[in-house]
Image: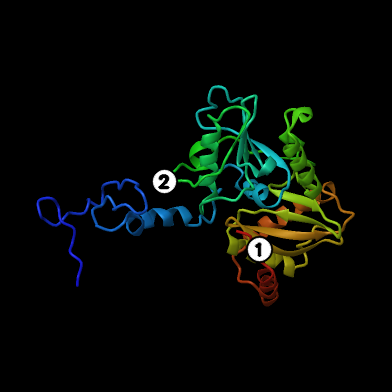
Amino acid sequence: MAKKRPQTKAGRTSTAQRSDEPIPVVGAREPCPCGSGRRYKACHGRAAAQAVTALVQRPFEGLAGECDWVALRELVPAATAELTLKGGLPEGVPSVTLATVLPMAWPALRRDNGTVLLGLQNDTSSGDISRDLADVLQRALPAAPGSPVAAQRVPADGPRLQDLLDPEAPFTPVVHSGFEFWLEDAANSSPEVAASLERANEAAIPTARLSGVEAAYWCETPEKNHLRWVMSHPEEKLLDALARLHAAGSSSLGDGTRLVGSFRAHGLVVPVWDLPSTVRADDVEKPAAAFADRLADALSSDAPLTSDERRARGGLTNRQVTLS
């Protein structure tokens, strides 16, 4: 037997709320306010849930230093960067600092002196890292001094970092050798924080940011060193350009170095070079700047790829992985 449509008190069939009116959020098992007669979770609540979980491919697009945001999220163990809010800082908040990681994996921390630390490398509850970070930041600003900020599920229509940060302010990461920047007063830190600091320092890979090019990071590993360079060029155009250079034998950064492939992270491509263990960050400053000039020339070409260049591109593509 077919179900009867819901009736109003006057006995007439209820009319659904006009589609152009906002639908209030209610409990998942409550009737949807639109008047459909279905539970909220099976009606407008479904769209709200999908909006929260939908993956944003480039969550940092539109922020100053998008490539460095990606690097700090995925590549760099210990780094900080000062953030500038639109409209200035609230009273009682001397500064807001982005940090790759915070003690105990806290999403954010309001220090005793009122400053705010915002953690970047945390798990997020939605498909939009920018929205998750903005929610944490908004809750950290009025938090009680000396308290961490817990994670929570964010609303689908909440603000994003792009809504909160000044797009004209510079974004300048500072790479650290360890996580001592966590501590205001090392002598009075809790045993839990001290233990977390020790574990983090032991696991940190030595890393340095090159000064001559944007978002290129050298790192040291036991077998060999690497340069990982986050680039904002359109992926297909960049892969063509890298293939042209690789086929021409001009994709390396000096003797003993080689371009070994790339990976995707948050919508951007990150080429990776293997370096001999004797090659330090300072040693690749000039070669990286020279490579940037060669890459600019290759990016400007619209000529079809040659057979050698197509083979080089295929090799680069086959070795490409996606982190996010």
In the picture of the structure, the residue carrying the numbered disc 2 is 157
Image coordinates of residue 161 in percent, x first then y, are 52, 41
Q: Residue furthest bottom?
A: 307
Q: Residue at x 74, y 42 (%)?
A: 196
Q: Is residue 62 visible?
A: no
In the picture of the structure, the residue carrying the numbered disc 1 is 241
Q: Quadrant of the C terminus?
A: bottom right
Vertical side of 54 occupied by 80: above or below: above
Q: Quadrant of the N terminus?
A: bottom left
Q: Is residue 274 left or right of residue 305?
A: right
Q: Residue furthest right?
A: 278
Q: Residue at x 52, y 45 (%)?
A: 152
Q: Nearer the viewer, residue 146 or 191?
A: 191
Image coordinates of residue 116 in percent, x first then y, are 61, 32
Q: Mark 1 or mark 2, which has the lower sequence index? A: 2
Q: Is residue 279 left or right of residue 142?
A: right
Q: Secondary structure at mark 1?
A: helix
Q: Residue furthest top?
A: 91
Q: Nearer the viewer, residue 268 or 79?
A: 79
Q: Is residue 266 left or right of residue 285?
A: left
